[in-house]
Amino acid sequence: MRQDVAVKKIVESLKGETCVQSLFLKGSMGRNEHDEHSDIDLYCLVDEEEEASFLTRRVDHLKAYKELFFYEDIFIIAPQVLGVYEDGIHIDLFTVTNKTIQEKDYFRVLYDRDGVMDNYVSTQNLTLPIEEGRDNADDVVWFLFQYTKAKARGNDIWATEMLRHCVRYLGNLLLYRYAKDRSLLGIKAVQSDLPPEQKNQLLEIYEHITPSSHQEAVKNIIRLIDEEFEWHASQFEVPSQTKKLLELVKDRI
């Protein structure tokens, strides 16, 4: 695949940096699940004292594959260059140190100067943490509450947005129950990892999250919550006030 060619050329360039300890892939390429449409999530672990200097040279290394059609320097979980090539390949180059590396997702090591990545093998996982699951359960209810406000105002566009937020978090919870070891992937994994019954329920909901049909969507959401929420509430120790808010929301709908 083109992504593999790009990665090989960029990695060879990065290996010339004496400050680079390790180079590894995360995301679908790190899990060997990628296809021709996949992004490249390339991580570069550098010596902390050389990080600032290295950041100034990142774009040069990305050009080892081809000239960049578009790029942007941003910070989400780490300093990151988001790049797009004229052939449509999208790469995210993250720069981390031993202090900032995050122990989530599976990775594929491409270069490891000192063998430091061995320290992180045992922590690889894609399971939604309990704290995040609890927050997701709260968010499902909260955005349903906000939906009732938008609906009451007659703001159909905002109402659909509130339902989209709600279903995003509901999808995470469903993954935790039915595909726990994939639940950190979030809503994009629903299509491939949920059982057919639950996937079809979500598809039906999404079909109706529109300005003209959102009231049908919310009925289906409540029906799905009635089937699932108690299980998730027990798993994540959802606060009693969240359950009370859910009952208020159901009364308002």
Image (cartoon, rainbow, N blue to C red):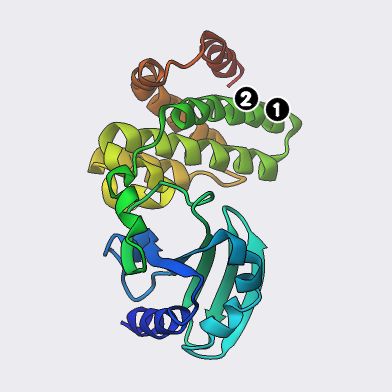
Counting every numbered tag in the picture gives 2
Give percent across and percent down for residue 55. 63, 71
Image position of 133 (left or right of 110): right
Res. 102 mark: none
Give percent across and percent down for residue 124. 32, 47
Q: Which residue is mark 2?
A: 145
Circle 2 SS class: helix
Q: Which residue is mark 1?
A: 149
Circle 1 SS class: helix
Residue type, mark 1 in image:
Lys
The Cα–Cα distance between marks 2 and 1, rounded to whole angstroms, is: 7 Å
| Residue at image location 38% in from the left, 73% down from the top | 37
Mark 2 surroundings: few (<14), some (14-19) or many (≥20) residues within 10 A? many
Depth check: give the residue in front, 196 or 93: 93
Give percent across and percent down for residue 224. 39, 28
Q: Are marks 2 and 1 in contact (CB under 8 Å)?
A: yes
Residue type, mark 2 in image:
Phe
Depth check: give the residue in front, 197 or 169: 169
| Residue at image location 30% in from the left, 31% down from the top | 177
Mark 1 surroundings: few (<14), some (14-19) or many (≥20) residues within 10 A? some
